[in-house]
Amino acid sequence: MSTDGVGFGVPWQVSAFQLPAEAPGAAELVTRIRELRARILFDGGRRPDFRDGEDYVDDQELDFGAWHFVGRREADGPPVGYVRLSTPQTGRLFQSRAFLGEGPFEDLLTEEGLGTAETFEHSRLVVEHRARKLGLGVHLNAMAIAAARCLGAKAMIGTSGTADGQDLFHERFGFRPVPGTRRYVERYTEDVVLMLYRAARGAGEYTALVEQLEPVFSTITVTPERALGDLPRAHGRAGSSAVTIPAPGADRRMDAEVWRPVLFEPQRAEDRGELDALLASGQVREVCDTIEEQLRELVRSREPGRKLAGAELERAVGEQLAGVDPASYGVWAWYPWSGRLVHLLPREEFRLVRTDRNRGRIERPQQRELMARRVGVIGLSVGSSAALTFAMEGIGGAFKLADFDDLSLSNLNRLRAGVHHMGLNKCVISARQMLEIDPWLDIEIYPAGLTDENMPEFFSGGHGPIDLLVEECDTPYVKIAAREHARRLGIPVVMDANDRGLLDVERFDLEPERPLLHGILGETTSADLLDLTFDQIVDLILTMVDRERISPELAASIPQIGKTLSSWPQLASGVALGGALTAEAARRILLGQPRPSGRFYTDLELLTRADRSTVA
């Protein structure tokens, strides 16, 4: 069955089959389905529990007896998407039942006036990175709902992740979150929520599509062998680059979730085909190809004493290419949010040239040492300057960014962002900007901010533990709770206070018993800082930054907050200085150079007074 991908211009081939346990070869067919799902869910290590050694694992007895829907771009192409629909016959195995618990699950159905014989389960919607944002997920979801309605479902139930807005995606189909069911699930490394759908209420903004697909359901049922086709084994693809290609006309909410670039290696046949398809799709607004100049910089930077020029320079470039066509050398980086496709050197050569001017200050062995480190940043207002400075300077090859806030107009006085960024989460903005500097950075974002639920993952889970924390949030509870975690784990903390150039350093890696914030708050713990009033928060923050040392301007502003001033005064110059100060401290700490705990002021007004001038 071929239909247009919901106005995205992509004809999707969708096949459906049901697999009884007693069917010949059922075990092998289920194994192939599970490998496809688990490889996509593993997501390059984002959800490590879906991989065991070299094998991808997602064993669920629920697979037998369920309906399986497989999506592909061409009829004979590889499967690139999947969703499962479980019928009431296997209701005792529903993963939503296991998630909620037997009693609460039955209570929920009773409260909703539903019976087990009319409630189906929707689960395991997965799409290969290279096929995302082209409408396949929408199409598969709509097909599963259409099939359930054809099979007599009055309701559908299922669990949904939340980290990438999956729950919001399902809400657009008419699913609603069940209050009180959201909680962190280790296997998925994110918060999961139970969602419920009522067939009688249509399918939200996709009602017309679901109704269009209902009569199609009976025509797409095939044998499992035909549906799966030549499904490749998953081995060897766990570390593949994330591919997210939004289509023209995708709504802003979908665009707001996109922050990872797509990397194509044109010397690989599969990537070359995908790159050609992208170029033909009309999505690319600008092609930036300076590969030949990058190659010249590369050979010059390796031998600066040779003064390469003219024919000798071109000969050195030819030796570097070693017979490879320049158009196929290195990688092409696709930035979906800007529509730019950029040709770059391979990663190590790219980084060698990009940080070449660091030498003399940061030598290449030190550069490699810094790139092996992971940095956490909490608060992406002041912290955005730190994160971008770190990325530019090569301080860290991996980052975790946490901020619950979206960019507003009043943020544009100090954040490096544009008017087109308003309404986007600050983590997304920073991640995009950092990956435009180095598309190979390993970045994880926490757009819900740092919470009690995700704090252990932020410090120790995800893609790996952090080596240093930059703390720039405004919430006293989080400021102290984060330091409690950092001290317990021996992680150094740096903070810029955005007033008088105050840099705060706490070397919990060297001083595991060091009092939080140098003992300024005494024995206060994070538990003491819950449910504070606004005035209490202001008083506490003033204590944290030492009210006796703040600038006269800030001291005069405090009483006016909420009266003549809407919030704390901050300037772009102070934020930029904070990025420099935290970067300098972090670089020294991560390289094992002297940088003791303490508080240090770089007060530009004092440092640039007339009596400080070094000339007459």
Image (spheres, rainbow, N blue to C red):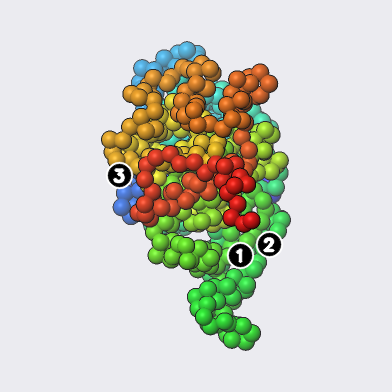
Query: Disc 1 marks which amino acid?
Result: His
Callout 2 secondary element: strand
Residue 267: percent from the left, percent from the top?
A: 53, 70
Do tag 3 and tag 2 residues touch (Cβ < 8 Å)? Answer: no
Residue 310 appears in which quarter of the rendering? bottom right
Sequence-earlier tag: 2 or 1:
2
Residue 407 or residue 98, whichever sits in front: 407
- The local crowd at label 2, few if under 14, some if 14 to 19, many if 20 or more residues have their Cα within 10 Å, is some
- The local crowd at label 1, few if under 14, some if 14 to 19, many if 20 or more residues have their Cα within 10 Å, is many
Residue 446: percent from the left, percent from the top?
A: 49, 37
The disc at residue 343 is 1
Callout 3 secondary element: loop
Query: Disc 2 marks which amino acid?
Result: Val
The disc at residue 510 is 3
Query: Disc 3 marks which amino acid?
Result: Leu
Residue projecting furthest to the bottom = 311
Residue 391 located left or right of residue 334: left
Sequence-earlier tag: 3 or 2:
2
Sequence-earlier tag: 3 or 1:
1
Residue 210 located left or right of residue 65: right
Residue 213 appears in which quarter of the rendering? top right
| Residue behind mark 2 | 287
Residue drawn at (51%, 56%) of the image: 393
Residue 566 or residue 416, whichever sits in front: 566
Callout 1 secondary element: strand
- Rendered view: 530 above or below 594: above
Residue 265 appears in which quarter of the rendering? bottom right
Do tag 3 and tag 1 residues touch (Cβ < 8 Å)? Answer: no
The total of numbered circles placed on residues is 3
